[in-house]
């Protein structure tokens, strides 16, 4: 399906429209917001410590007197970058593995799908924790762990999709005119298995954001004083009785963004998969 | 005929469980060996005495082929020997045994709450489709899916512990301590169950046998409970099984929020302290529980739906 028709399909459904609008806003906030706001997210101001929202600090100030609004805005950049890189990484690696397994078959398929099955033997959350144990704590390692956690999912989807396309006539046609294996995979197969992968990727953005912020909240992801939504909640949790605003706004940001990704994913699935279309 | 195929199904599933458990063990085995550094030092601790490192090297057979190492590893695990914690110097199995009940009760109570709230919510949404009730229950379940667990926990603590002082915010010394963690952990599963029940019920309500049941004059209640709900339950059971596994995994976060003395908190502390024997054992345990629960839900699935056994 052409990308234009796809976009129209998403925007036609109310939930897709709302979801896309939410995500568009969040992306704007993340990548333009810091330039417009011009408040240092890590400048401490002990006189403003835990101050509730006011004209000076719209979202209040945190335990070190830092501006919460500015931290939420910079945190959007951090959280969205981590989430998107994690999902794109697993989309690329997982799809390549699934495609290779489905197209080559034989020993390749056995080996790859066995590996996928092995990674799926434990819950994704646990796999991410194990990956962090091995790689260590840090932003790059967090992204890698998020990617590892989703690789088996994309590999499975790509594998199944490839199997259903592999025997079609246009593939045979490409083979008969002597197209190389690589050309067939990249030019013929990839465009035809994209739809289910796109749906999965969008829905996966939602769960990955939740997972990423959970890991940072646990102290295994982005480390303070870097502004990130999960890490902000971890910092503010000791002050919930005196200053609930410190945990209110980062949590709302996570929730709204997750909602946006979920709504978009659902709309995308409805557009691409006729089985889910409303009657 | 029927019984033999059922027995075959059981044997096949149990064999598959064994394979799955081996896979979990293998992933953990490989992961710990991927930690930079000499595995013997990794598992003995960086400040261990050289003779302790040598002892571990010998016990694990690190000078022998990898496959034999894995065999030795599985052998020790089967006997409950997970080594000693690098921090407490106690056998890891003791800590696990002490911590497991807290996690088990938290996950189980949450599942019960999730089912008891999620199922009726989904059923009501389906039979009152398009009404305000449907809208409210779906809004609840969408927020349940999108709300980060730890944030919900913090909000509940803010309101019920810090502001109102009704419920304790941490520890485990009685039933009152369960309330907030259970609500926190159950929310996501409740939402998922409600969504699944709703869509399954909507599918089932369109079926011919439901129309037949209505046509023969059954009261609506009997149509819903005996005909529709029973058939809608089949996919729901699979979701419930998945949710239990999910609850065990994600209780890690809830346990951290509420300082709940379970295995999740143990795991997070161990990862931060590079206490690899504890990480290894905890991940193995949660992974194994996950596999066993999936098997149990497969059995429940087959029990409800005879078509699956016959396949």
Image: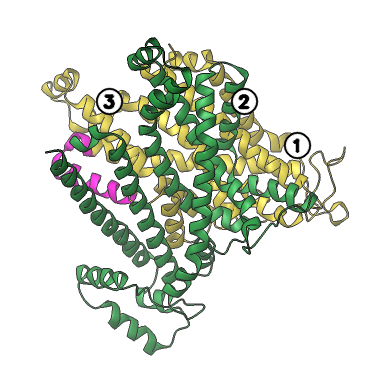
Chain colours: A yellow, B green
Q: Quadrant of residue A1?
A: top left
Q: Which range of residues does the magenta coloring cover? A: A101-119
Q: Chain of mark 3?
A: A
Q: Quick one: B216 or A5, which is closer to the camera? A: B216
Task: Quadrant for residue B257, please give it.
Answer: bottom right
Same chain under badges 3 and 1? The reply is yes
Cα distance between the residues tagged 2 and 3: 46 Å
Q: CA distance from mark 3 to mark 1?
A: 44 Å
The residue that label 1 is drawn on is A37
- When the figure is inspected, residue A38 is found, relative to residue B260, above or below; the finding is above
Asked whether the viewer can see residue A41, the reply is no
Instruction: Tell me, yes or no, whether the highlighted magenta stretch contains residue A213.
Output: no
Circle 1 chain: A
Crowding near pointer 2: few (<14 within 10 Å), some, many (20+)? few
Q: Residue at x 35, y 33 (%)?
A: B234
Relative horizontal placement of residue A158, taking residue B256 as reference (left or right): left
Mark 3 surroundings: few (<14), some (14-19) or many (≥20) residues within 10 A:
few
Observer-side mark, 2 or 1, equals 2
3D distance between C-alphas at marks 2 and 1: 37 Å
For label 2, the SS is: helix
* Residue at point 49%, 40% (across, down): B115
Q: Which mark is residue A187?
A: 3
Looking at the image, which residue is at 13% across and 21% down?
A: A177
> Where residue A247 sits: x, y (%)?
71, 47
Question: Label 2 belongs to which residue?
Answer: B136
Where the C terminus of chain B falls, by quadrant? top left
Q: Main secondary structure of the magenta part?
A: helix
Which chain contains the residue that carries disc 2?
B
């Amino acid at each position: 399906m052409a990308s234009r028709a796809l976009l129209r399909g998403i925007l036609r459904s109310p939930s897709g429209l709302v979801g896309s609008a939410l995500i568009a806003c969040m992306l704007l906030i993340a990548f333009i917001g810091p330039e417009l706001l011009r408040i240092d997210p890590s400048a401490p101001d002990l006189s403003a410590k835990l101050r509730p929202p006011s004209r000076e600090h719209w979202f209040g100030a945190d335990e070190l007197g830092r501006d919460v609004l500015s931290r939420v805005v910079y945190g959007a950049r951090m959280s969205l970058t981590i989430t998107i890189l994690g999902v794109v990484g697993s989309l690329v690696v997982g799809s390549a593995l699934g495609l290779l397994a489905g197209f080559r078959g034989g020993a390749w398929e056995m080996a790859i799908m066995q590996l996928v099955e092995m990674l799926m033997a434990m819950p994704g959350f646990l796999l991410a924790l194990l990956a962090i144990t091995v790689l260590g704590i840090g932003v790059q390692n967090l992204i890698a762990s998020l990617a590892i956690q989703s690789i088996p999912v994309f590999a499975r989807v790509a594998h199944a999709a490839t199997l259903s396309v592999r025997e079609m006539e246009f593939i045979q046609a490409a083979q008969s005119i002597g197209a190389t294996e690589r050309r067939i995979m990249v030019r013929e197969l990839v465009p035809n298995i994209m739809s289910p992968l796109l749906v999965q990727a969008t829905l996966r953005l939602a769960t990955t954001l939740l997972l990423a912020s959970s890991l940072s909240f646990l102290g295994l992801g982005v480390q303070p004083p870097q502004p990130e939504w999960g890490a902000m909640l971890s910092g503010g949790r000791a002050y919930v009785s005196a200053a609930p605003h410190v945990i209110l706004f980062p949590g709302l940001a996570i929730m709204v963004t997750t909602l946006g990704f979920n709504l978009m994913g659902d709309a995308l699935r409805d557009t691409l998969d006729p089985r889910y279309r409303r009657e | 005929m029927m019984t033999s195929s059922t027995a075959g199904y059981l044997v096949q599933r149990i064999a598959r469980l064994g394979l799955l458990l081996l896979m979990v063990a293998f992933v953990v085995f490989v992961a710990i060996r991927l930690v930079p550094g000499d595995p013997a030092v990794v598992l003995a601790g960086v400040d261990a005495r050289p003779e302790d490192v040598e002892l571990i090297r010998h016990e694990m057979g690190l000078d022998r082929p990898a496959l034999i190492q894995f065999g030795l590893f599985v052998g020790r695990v089967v006997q409950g020997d997970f080594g000693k914690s690098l921090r407490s110097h106690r056998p890891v199995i003791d800590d696990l045994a002490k911590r497991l009940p807290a996690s088990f009760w938290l996950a189980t109570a949450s599942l019960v709450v999730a089912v008891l709230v999620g199922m009726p919510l989904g059923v009501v949404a389906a039979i009152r489709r398009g009404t305000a009730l449907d809208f409210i229950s779906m809004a609840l379940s969408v927020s349940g899916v999108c709300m980060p667990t730890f944030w919900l926990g913090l909000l509940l603590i803010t309101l019920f512990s810090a502001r109102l002082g009704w419920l304790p915010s941490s520890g485990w010394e009685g039933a009152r301590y369960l309330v907030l963690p259970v609500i926190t952990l159950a929310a996501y599963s409740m939402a998922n169950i409600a969504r699944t029940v709703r869509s399954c019920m909507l599918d089932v309500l369109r079926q011919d046998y439901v129309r037949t049941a209505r046509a023969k004059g059954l009261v609506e209640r009997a149509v819903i409970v005996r005909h529709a709900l029973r058939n809608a339950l089949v996919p729901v059971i699979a979701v419930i099984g998945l949710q239990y596994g999910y609850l065990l995994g994600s209780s890690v976060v809830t346990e951290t929020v509420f300082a709940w003395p379970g295995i999740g908190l143990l795991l997070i502390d161990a990862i931060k302290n590079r206490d690899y024997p504890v990480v290894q054992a905890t991940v193995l345990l949660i992974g194994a529980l996950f596999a066993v629960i999936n098997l149990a839900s497969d059995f429940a699935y087959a029990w409800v739906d005879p078509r699956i056994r016959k396949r």
